[in-house]
Image (cartoon, helix red, strand yellow):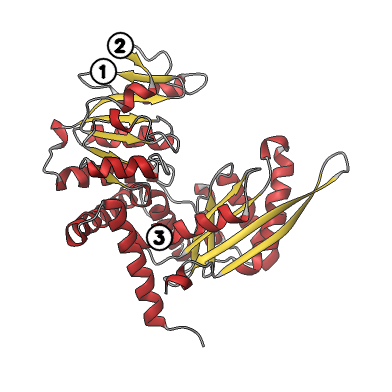
Amino acid sequence: MHKFLSTPERTLIVSVPVMLEDGQLEVYTGYRVQHSTGRGPGKGGIRFHPGVTLEEVEGLAMLMTWKCAVTDLPLGGAKGGVAVDPHRLTRRQVERLTKRYTAAILPIIGPERDIPAPDVNTDESTMAWIVDTVTMMTGQHSPEVVTGKPIELGGSRGRTEATGRGVAFVTLEALKRAGRLPENTRVAVQGFGNVGSVTAKGLAEAGCKIVAVSDVSGGYAAPYGIDIPGAIEHVRRHPKRLLEGLPGLSKISNAELIAMDVDVLVPAALEGQITSANVHEVRAKIIVEGANGPITADADRKLADRGVVIMPDILANAGGVVVSYFEWVQSRAQFYWELDEVERRLEIYMRRASDLVLAKTKVYDCTPREAAFIVAVERVASAIEKRGIFP
């Protein structure tokens, strides 16, 4: 089983030719990898980035398998991408690139095979172009072929905020397990983009005191708590959409934010923020990984040895794929839910998954990260064993 689960089921490498406005022909390399469809159709994003490689896409597809399994979604793991710098292309060229790539991978994607979604440098417009391509090539309106679509094409309400809302629900479940009340909890959030700001808002609404936030302009702290709705409105009005200039707060660095004496730290910015170089400065009792890989492996071990509870990224930021699943369900049924229904169901999925992972830490005497992978692998392996190996 280990050998089977460590190998992708299917790997497709495609050439993606794009005719530029000056008549030149550029040819890019694209990939779509399906790691496992043992529990259901593949699910995973498409990224456009010059650093995309087959090895990267294979690794990300495997992570999607575990992310879907730990949250108990009836989906497998997949990922795709094109090795291209979209910022060097016009919008029209990116559209042509997307549609040609879609045509190339069409034989292996579909609502019952593999459902793409946005990722790095792709968005709801990219998904709309994919829907259009599939519809034109099959003669059937196919909104369920992707998720992360515009609302007008069958996208789900709450999809944009889903990852941040999920991080907040996981945090609240970790606090519940630790016997902490939200109103007695001090939180620092690193990163105030789509994930960090929504997480901070959700935790503040639950009663937590958000004492520090940060973005690329630096960190901002207030010992008695930050007005998060006010901070979000400030960012919305800022010409560069930054926290810069937020009044009434102390300016701190990102390094100082990580070292703050808080109950919960939510790194929701970039990977590799807590390393062996600064792990000794971390004073938070609970860390919830809003970003992918914000803690290096060495730092992770040292924090675990100190008894710090780390809610891993594979679980903590899975809210996005959970609501992607909801979107797929809604698109297939052609029946769409109100926002409160989406958020109610998201909370159920995220809290249930968190509760199970934290319970498994007691059963196996392990960290939440190890428990999350145990839950995920057990579910995928069990599904494959029950299905049997064809033929």
Which residue is nearer to you in this view: 3 or 97?
Answer: 3
Q: Outermost residue toward the right? A: 23
Question: Counting other residues with Cα less than 10 Å from the Cα at mark 3, is it few (<14), some (14-19), or many (20 or more)?
Answer: many
Do the numbered discs 2 and 1 sit on residues whose CB atoms are within 8 Å? Answer: yes
Q: Quadrant of residue 184?
A: top left
Say which mark, if any, is on residue 320.
none
Q: Tag 3, which secondary structure?
A: helix
Q: Quadrant of residue 92?
A: top right
- Quadrant where the N terminus lies? bottom left
Q: Tag 1, which secondary structure?
A: loop
Q: Tag 2, which secondary structure?
A: loop
Compared with residue 278, is residue 79 higher up or lower down, i.e. above or below?
A: below
Do the numbered discs 2 and 3 sit on residues whose CB atoms are within 8 Å? Answer: no
Q: Outermost residue toward the bottom? A: 391
Is residue 72 something one can see in this rendering? no
Q: What residue appears at the point 40 percent right and 38 percent down from the top-left corner?
A: 195
| Image coords of residue 275 (percent x, y) | 38, 35
Is residue 273 something one can see in this rendering? yes
Report which residue position mark 2 lands on: 248
| Image coords of residue 5 (percent x, y) | 45, 69
Q: What residue appears at the point 71 percent right and 60 percent down from the top-left corner?
A: 14
Question: The disc labelled 3 sits on which kind of residue?
Answer: Trp
Q: Is residue 271 left or right of residue 350?
A: right
Report which residue position mark 3 lands on: 66
